[in-house]
Image: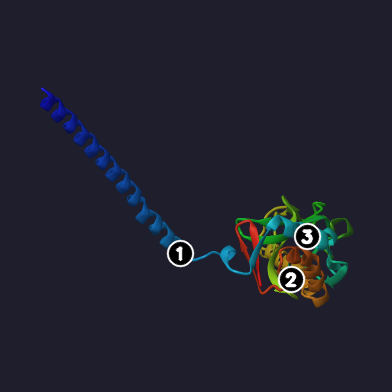
Amino acid sequence: MKNLKSLIVLFAILLINNMQAQNVKVRSSVKTSKKPELIKQSRNAESSPSSVGNKVGCKQVSTRIVSGILKNSVARDLKITLDKESSQVTIMNKTQKFTIPERKITKAGHDWVYYVNDIISIKSWSTFDSKTKKFYLFVEFEGNDSEIKGKCPGCLKRFKDRRAPDINWEGNRTARITLNPIPYNNSISFEIEKVILDGKFDFNGPADFFVAPLVKYFEAKIKEGIEKEAKKILNNPSNKKAIADALRGTVKFLGLNSVRTVEVTGENLYICD
């Protein structure tokens, strides 16, 4: 009887030891199965191309901060007047004048003459668009329902201003000046890429064959004039330096002593020395 009890106790001990050994083996196998997965992720991270934000010597600043500085240094004093022979662009207290030539339309009986008629900006601001990854200066213009005036010089006096229908600038009457950030003088400045006109020029009268080419002519001349003269102002070394000086505090705050490249990624501007 004692021998039987001893055998039972011995069998129980062996059974417990066996179960413990299996449990340790299971834990060990679970633990080691994670190692290859972690190593695999690490290798993938090392092999993937690094973004500009991970490059040594690069710092990021929110595009909102940069846009705010643009507003105070450039957009705040931006004004544009469009008026036949006395058009002008004013940026940073510098003014460039230009003309938008009138356009003659040959008609049976009497020719019609069209010209830009006293379009004045009323508001300006700066912004950043994350979709296009571009900075913009926006200029909004007043509407007087006769932005492009039509005249009939050879008509009777009472018909001189009535015979040729005007062209109205309807909808969102704004000019968007597209800006690209560039490194300049160990800081950041901007250069103009192009000008986009929003809204629609609509003929205030019966449609005719000359309407579409006439509208295209004035749209092109307005964009060309704004872009050409605005570039003259912002590309001036003293004005580039003024913008760079306005952003220099931000560059120094980031701990950068020089700026070699500037790149927009997402909602941030990355500055690298």
> Which is more foreground, mark 1 or mark 2?
1
Q: Residues within 10 Å of mark 3 (few under 14, many from 20)?
A: some
Q: Is residue 143 above or below residue 262?
A: above
Amino acid type for the residue under numbered disc 2: Ser
- Horizontal relation, residue 146 to residue 209: left or right: right
Circles 1 and 3, Cβ within 8 Å, touching? The answer is no
Label 1, on which residue?
A: 46
Quadrant of res 233: bottom right
- Horizontal relation, residue 129 to residue 88: left or right: left
Q: Nearer the viewer, residue 204 or 182?
A: 182
Amino acid type for the residue under numbered disc 1: Glu
Label 3, on which residue?
A: 69
State the CA–CA distance, disc 2 to disc 3.
13 Å
State the CA–CA distance, disc 1 to disc 3.
37 Å
Counting from the top left corner in percent of width and height, residue 107 is at 73, 65
Counting from the top left corner in percent of width and height, residue 180 is at 68, 67
> Which is more foreground, mark 2 or mark 3?
2
Q: Earlier in the sequence, mark 1 or mark 2?
A: 1
Q: Residues within 10 Å of mark 1 (few under 14, many from 20)?
A: few
Q: Residues within 10 Å of mark 2 (few under 14, many from 20)?
A: many
Amino acid type for the residue under numbered disc 3: Ile
Judged from the image, the secondary structure of the residue bearing numbered disc 2 is strand
Q: Is residue 28 above or below residue 1?
A: below
Q: Earlier in the sequence, mark 2 or mark 3?
A: 3
